[in-house]
Amino acid sequence: MNALIVRCTALGLLLCFAVAEVFAGTGANVHWVDTWGAPPDTAGPPLKAQTVREVIRTSIGGSGLRIRLSNLNGTGPVTIGPVHVALSTGESAIQPGSDHAVKFDGKSTVTIAKGQSVLSDAVAMRVAPLQSLAVSMYLPTDTGASTLHATGIATTYLNENGDATASAAVPNSEVVSSRFFLTDVEVDANPSARTFVAFGDSITDGMNSTPDTNRRWPDVFASRLQADPALAFIAVVNSGISGNRILNDGLGPNALSRFDRDALSKPDVKWILLLEGINDIGAAGQAQAPKDNVSAQQIIDGMKTLIARAHAKGIKVWGATLTPFGGVEWPYHTATAEAKRQAVNSWIRTSGAFDAVVDFDKLVRDPAHPDRFLPAFDSGDHLHPSDAGYKAMANSIDLSLFAKG
């Protein structure tokens, strides 16, 4: 232990003890944490009887896993199964010998009531950090409206040639870029494992990043944590929803209504990074109803509510400043919208309401045109970062924040 403490002085005794637990952990300890997430945000198209194969990447590893399937946006009960999980080797292919059947209360199929979700039985399958997994599910009957995470930034394979959940690959499939039914993958990790939730809108969701490359900023941040032995016990869960707003529903439920489900209820969550409010501002310029024309103070008050709810559970909240969107087509970006963004960012930086501030705005903005992205960090739509921008965001987060409090 003494040698371990000496090597960890940069991050303090708190993290040293956490690292010690990682090395001292035994298989007898069962400690579930989310290693991956994609919150349900909308009703998707009805699916016929077919196989759906989705590829995800873990943030931390463990000695077992279980998955959560959701029928939140269904119009009636949905039956799913068989379900399999295996190591992915690229596209729809899986590693031979790695396939495992997933059970639900010991059964190969499960019927999920409208609006509900189910957690699978534990699967005795060791997975590594940053491991690509293929989760395959067979839909034996028409589903009605599916439950979707619309902006997957990853390929999902749909195949109508019967049950292919255990197949080595699913060629000749229809490919889409959304997630169906699958919302969480948990791993049985060491007792020291804790969860960091990235909670936000399309910028957290990874819009305009390169598909199938895990270049969203939370993905890059997970890789960065895994490269540091003192922080490799931290799981990163992406709870971004494209189009999300704090105060009103957009694409998916508003942040205030989904905060418990998509952040506070995650197993052993200790930190949340909040990057929300841009769509509240943008929607105000295109208000469909009076309630959509929100003020900077209303956005701030919404943030205060989220912070209070997290603090009541002993969870730290880091506030990320809102990134620029100058150049986005009017009326999304206007002088009024920019004034609101500046007011919200000033409050984030100076109020002391957050446990820490991550100044993404200062990082990505063009000093010559501070209402716009630096060209190298702009994906081209003037609203979402490029791969380089997402990487810079992930690399800008001060890792010493984990040792504070």
Image: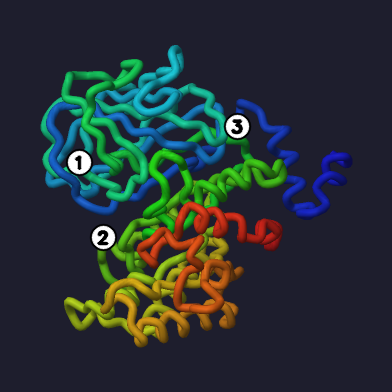
Say left or right for 322 vs 352: left
Tell me the CA gap for discs 1 and 2: 23 Å
Tell me the CA gap for discs 3 and 2: 39 Å
Q: Which mark is residue 330?
A: none
Residue, disc 2? 251
Residue, disc 3? 29
- Spot the residue most to the top: 97
Point out residue 319 in the picture as x, y percentages from the top left corner: 53, 69
- For numbered disc 3, what is the local secondary structure? loop
Point out residue 270 in the picture as x, y percentages from the top left corner: 57, 55
Residue, disc 1? 113
In front: mark 3 or mark 2? 2
Query: Which of the two labelled residues, at mark 1 and mark 3, occupies the earlier sequence position?
Result: 3
Question: In which image quadrant can residue 66 be found?
Answer: top left
Say what amino acid the circle numbered 3 marks.
Asn
Q: Give the vertical position of 384 relative to 156 (above or below).
A: below
Image quarter (top left, top right, bottom left or bottom right) of the C terminus: bottom right
Say what amino acid the circle numbered 2 marks.
Leu
Say what amino acid the circle numbered 1 marks.
Ala
Res 105 visible: no
Q: Nearer the viewer, residue 353 or 348?
A: 348
Point out residue 307 in the picture as x, y percentages from the top left corner: 49, 70
- For numbered disc 2, what is the local secondary structure? loop
- Whether the residues at callouts 3 and 2 have beta carbons within 8 Å, the answer is no
Q: Give the vertical position of 138 relative to 216 (above or below).
A: above
- Residue at image x 58%, y 43%? 223
Categorize mark 2 by other alpha carbons within 10 Å: few (<14), some (14-19), many (20+).
some
Q: Give the vertical position of 156 relative to 239 (above or below).
A: above
Query: Which of the two labelled residues, at mark 1 and mark 2, occupies the earlier sequence position?
Result: 1
